[in-house]
Image (cartoon, helix red, strand yellow):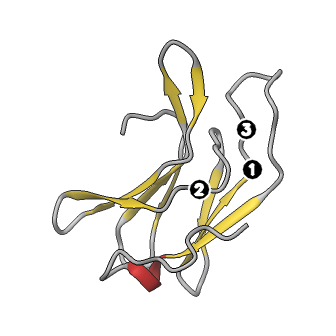
Amino acid sequence: EQRNIPAVVRDATGAIAVMGGLEHGEELRALRTAERYVVETGQWEPLPELQVARCCCSGALDARGRLFVVGGGDNMYRSSRAWSSIEWLDTALGSDTGDYGEAWIP
């Protein structure tokens, strides 16, 4: 999916995770979608949707292999709503099967 201003992090398996972002169309729309690019296969794989649509957010990976998405907002303009929330996903759970259990946890 095309997106601007997402959070991008290398996950515990070495894949590149892309989370949230902004879709440009008739209207600016923050995205809940997430996906990972598996370098070895050259393929994109879907991740569970975020709990909150976010653009301009930050991402991180902790020592346990969990992906975190932090902050962001409705869009990139000063007048938009901003989020102070965090969500996380344990990518090690579903890296082989695609089953990520409870998905993103607020």
Which quarter of the image is occupied by the N terminus?
Answer: top left
Compared to residue 41, the image places residue 92 above or below, namely below
Q: Earlier in the sequence, mark 3 or mark 2?
A: 2
> What residue is shown with label 1?
71
**Mark 1 to mark 3 CA distance (whole Å):** 7 Å
Q: Nearer the viewer, residue 84 or 104?
A: 104
Q: Given contact means CB atoms under 8 Å apart, are the residues at marks 1 and 3 in contact?
A: yes
Q: Secondary structure at mark 3?
A: loop
Q: Position of residue 68 (x, y in %)?
A: 63, 66
Circle 1: is it few (<14), some (14-19), or many (20+) Cα within 10 Å?
some
- Residue at image x 31%, y 81%? 97
Closer to the eye: label 1 or 2:
2
Q: Earlier in the sequence, mark 1 or mark 2?
A: 2
Q: Secondary structure at mark 2?
A: loop
Compared to residue 23, the image places residue 34 above or below, namely below
**Mark 1 to mark 2 CA distance (whole Å):** 12 Å
- Residue at image x 68%, y 64%? 87
> What residue is shown with label 3?
73
> What residue is shown with label 2?
50
Kind of residue sitting beneath label 1: Gly
Q: Position of residue 5 (x, y in %)?
A: 55, 36
Kind of residue sitting beneath label 2: Leu
Circle 3: is it few (<14), some (14-19), or many (20+) Cα within 10 Å?
many
Kind of residue sitting beneath label 3: Gly
Q: Position of residue 29 (x, y in %)?
A: 59, 28
Identity of the residue furthest to the left in this view? 41
Q: Secondary structure at mark 1?
A: loop
Which quarter of the image is occupied by the C terminus?
Answer: bottom right
Identity of the residue furthest to the top in this view? 26
Compared to residue 96, the image places residue 10 above or below, namely above
